[in-house]
Amino acid sequence: MAADCLDRIFYFLDERPGIQHTCLFVNKQWSGTVVSRLWKEPFRQCFALSSSPQRVNQLMRTYMYFRDCINPNQTPTLYDYPSFLKKINIVEVDAAVREYVKWQNTSRNQEIDCKVLMDSVGMLLSTRCPGLNIVIAECRTSITWHDTIFSNSTIKFRTITTIICTLPGRKAGLLNRIVSNNLMHIAVSLDSASNQFEIEDAQALARLLTSQTRLKKFELARCGVSSPYVMSALRSQANSLRYIGFAAISFSKWITLEELVDFEQLETIVFNGCFDISAKLIAPIIIPNLLEIYLDVTPYQPEISDVCDIIARNFNNTLRVVNLGRHDGRNVIEPFAKWCPELREFSSSVPNGEIWALYDLLECCTHIEKVNVIGDIWNEFDVNQLFSKLGNLQLPNLRHLSICGKWQFSAGVLDQWLAGSAPALESLEFSWPVRFTEEHLEVIVRRLSGTLRYLKLQLFDAIDVDTICLSSCILALEVWPDNVDQ
């Protein structure tokens, strides 16, 4: 079998190390193909749920072999394992080193300095791993980043294309070790303990930004007083940047985002869990090619409706994707219905008082393909009139629809809507509709039998799906509660 075909097969194989490991012993071709997959992220695999200290020590012994000067008396390994390394999380590397030092000091009675060994491993990673292109410093647990984890100043990473550093603590030490000018993705959280440390980290980030030649994606989190350093340096990437994301940032001290005006190639802007986004902040941003905007702000954002109006007016005919997440704003849908006729995807909270704005959106945005509606999940609301009127629209492009909320509608009105608008739905989700019965399900199956592939229902009461002759074209069906007969 051709090597590229075999590689594609292994791509879809279960990624648990134990499953792929058995393929090493089939024949030489299988071994040579699967070994690169097993060793592309060995530190991550060592800290999987099925891992053990023995696996960590075995990995470290392998890397120590390549760290040491290889002499003729040493038994050569079958493969150059460090050359397969593609991605590391420095937190996992640090944990592996500490585990190895603990094992050496207790089992072998050898006194090994953890920091010296970490520097030695860092030097190996920076010199013997030509395929290393992703360096991460993040962890889901409460670990504080140690900026001096590599104390040897000669350790430099020259081949990487992605750097993600989101751990709490200082970042300048790691950022200063990145000497590659081919980065395509940078994600950094500036959350140092003091303003001075944050500024130093931002200055290191600014130096890294200005040295890049083809940066495509930039993500910034928790940046406060140091924002001028970062945004000024980011202008150097105006000709290449396609994506910029802000997360957990308070914009109360930011004057404007007018720096983004220069980014004519920018396609996506994300505001994730940000505070104090105002119309004044957004107003200067006019980008000719912007396609997607995600505005997942914190609850009770006071100016959300004004912000949405500015966004819709500024980007009108170019916008294809709008995701407003969960919010408590009013009059947020109407601007996009009025100014953005080319929308393809729309997702937003829809308060009960905004229901008819959803109709306006579907009426005006005739190319829309995907709609995600997050309604009121606490108070029951009758949408029979809305569904009945939707039957007057033609929605041939609608492919994916998700509705979450305590909406009440009859099976007859649902049938009227699906028959009249004839949406070619491939996926449909209803979460927490009121008094949803087998009759509703029968309507869905009958009207969408030619296109529907995925159906998900989260219901208050169980229904018997065995009473419905489900179309064979539905490839996936999820129904909750668990006591539903399937």
Image (cartoon, rainbow, N blue to C red):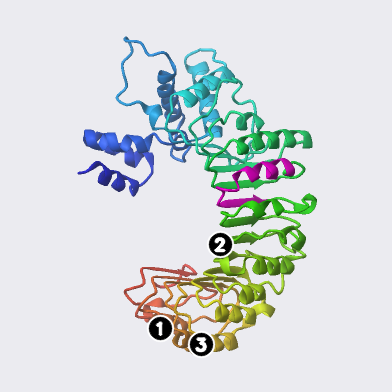
Residue 399 picture quarter: bottom left
The quarter of the image holding the C terminus is bottom left
Report the amino acid beneath label 1: Arg
Q: Residue at x 22, y 43 (%)?
A: 2
SS class, disc 2: loop
Tell me whether the residue at label 2 lies in contact with that at label 1, contact meaning CB atoms closer than 8 angstroms. Answer: no
Residue 391 - label:
3
- CA gap between label 3 and label 1 equals 13 Å
Residue at the disc numbered 2: 291
* Disc number lying in front (3 or 2): 2
Q: Residues within 10 Å of mark 1 (few under 14, many from 20)?
A: many
Name the N-terminal-most of marks 2 and 1: 2
Measure the alpha-carbon separation of dots 3 and 2.
Answer: 29 Å
In this rendering, which labeled residue sits more in front, label 3 or label 1?
3
Residue 313 vs 133, above or below: the answer is below
Image disc number at residue 447: 1
Between 240 and 366, the residue placed more toward the observer is 240
